[in-house]
Image (cartoon, rainbow, N blue to C red):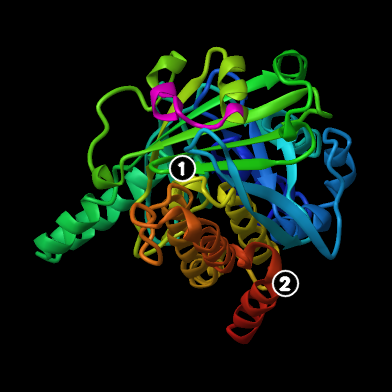
Amino acid sequence: MGSGTKFRVAICGAGIGGLTTAVALSRYPDIEVEIFEGAEKIAELGAGIGLFPRPWEVIKKLHLEEDLLKSTEVKPTEGPVASFRYRKSDRPEGLEFYTLVTKGNLLTFHRPDFQNALLRRLPASYRIHCSKRLRSYTQRYGGPINLLFEDGTRASCDVLVGADGLKSAVRRSLLGEKAQWAQSQNNWSEAADITALIEPTWSGTNAYRALITADRLRIRDPNHRVFTQPTQYLGRNGYIIAYPISHGKMINFVAFKSQHDLENTKFNGSWVCPTDKNEFISLFRNWEPEVQALLDCVDKPLRWAIHTVKPLESFVSGNVALLGDAAHAMTPHQGSGAGQAIEDAYILSTLLGHALTTKATIGRALSIYDHIRRPFALQTQERSRLNGRYFTLNCQEVDFDTVPDHEMLSKLKILGKVFTKNWEWAWMSSLGGSVQEALRLLESSG
């Protein structure tokens, strides 16, 4: 540890959450940072990423907006803006029924572009190690955290940030540590409950993702609405979302196929793998022509069996903290997984960088992070789950199987209002209040 360094932070995971944490910590030169990535090279899976105004606040505070906006055709807008158009599409003739109006717009990016913008902002002093998948860690009170990697190498740090995604090794080790402690107190039932939280659980929904070249879709349908209007096509037990990215050269396409009765069961098969579109197009076979045009242009889709992390009792243990998918992996139905990781990263780094946080008081900063972020992130996780029900016409408010044709439009408009109310936190609320409350708690305990 260099002179003038107050403590060392190790970040496991170089995805959006881990890299945002690193960039946010770079505001504090007295914190030493190392990043450990399990993959052989840094490469983001997935295609599109969307940010609503709330996490965009963080991007602006970190002075990343100028670099990021170079890679997208969408520019930030304040005030009311039409976002997604909604159509009931599981019929030969689609029915447009709702336009989502948000305060400020959804900014969409190609995920590797976003990651590269973060990488460019890392200080030269930050070291990134690839092919370093954590096996386990050990920590003792007052001492460093010792890290053991799958390749047998070791490292140490004062703070460990687990940003290593859905199958987080940091989460496994953290919950294993808590379960061992419960067992040592003869709390066998509690230990079993903690152990049950380690493995992710299937949501009952698979996503089929593809990038469609705009040129290809233009040949199939020159006037397709997704060139100019981000659109969601809804139907029973499935929906499709499509919108332009990469300066309009590509269309980000995702089809969702839901079996809600299988939620929280085990998925048999690869969670993420290339597949054939025949695996999912049968669900959409009788959907409207616009959907057929999109499906005709899908080539080499990736199947993502959507898994989530069960709600945790805490995101921290000692001087170890989880963030992003490692802490609260959620369904993508509110487009807020990346945004929540960014919010985690900003609150956590702000607390760690504060002058009152020293090597001796790291635990206090992490407990405040948990107090501020965990309730909100878990609420967002549940709200996203509910949107997945609404978008597949499975909702308590309206039984769409029994709605006569002459009432369909009015019932769909009710659905639009229901999912908007469930979602409006993303553009109606601000992270600023959470930052102020976190700092107030830290300063009142200083």
Q: What residue type is labelled 2?
A: Gly
Residue 214 in picture, x, y percent from top left = 75, 20
Q: Residue at x 25, y 42 (%)?
A: 262
In the image, what residue occupies the spot 65% across and 82% down? 440
- Which residues make up the magenta segment? 280-289
For the residue marked with disc 1, what is the amino acid? Gly
Q: Measured along the vertical axis of the image, is residue 287 above or below residue 348?
A: above
Image-based side of 196 in relation to 76, left or right: left
Dot 2 surroundings within 10 Å: few (below 14), some, or many (20 or more)?
A: few
Q: Where is residue 211 in the image (x, y as percent from the top left)?
A: 64, 22
Q: Does the magenta stretch include residue 282?
A: yes
Quadrant of res 404: bottom left
Name the image quarter holding residue 104: bottom right
| In this rendering, the label closer to the viewer, 1 or 2 | 1
Residue extending farthest front = 406
Mark 1 Cα-neighbour bin, 10 Å: few <14, some 14–19, many ≥20 = many
384 sits left or right of 358 in the view: left
Instruction: Say if residue 269 shows up in the picture.
Output: yes
Residue tagged 1: 235
Relative to the observer, which residue lies in front, 119 or 267?
Answer: 267
Residue 236, given in percent of the width and then of the height, sits at 40, 43
Q: In this view, does 56 lie to the left or right of 238?
A: right
Is residue 275 visible to the viewer in this orientation of the structure? Answer: no
Q: Do the residues labelled 1 and 2 touch (CB within 8 Å)?
A: no
Instruction: State which tag comes first along the sequence, 1 or 2.
Output: 1
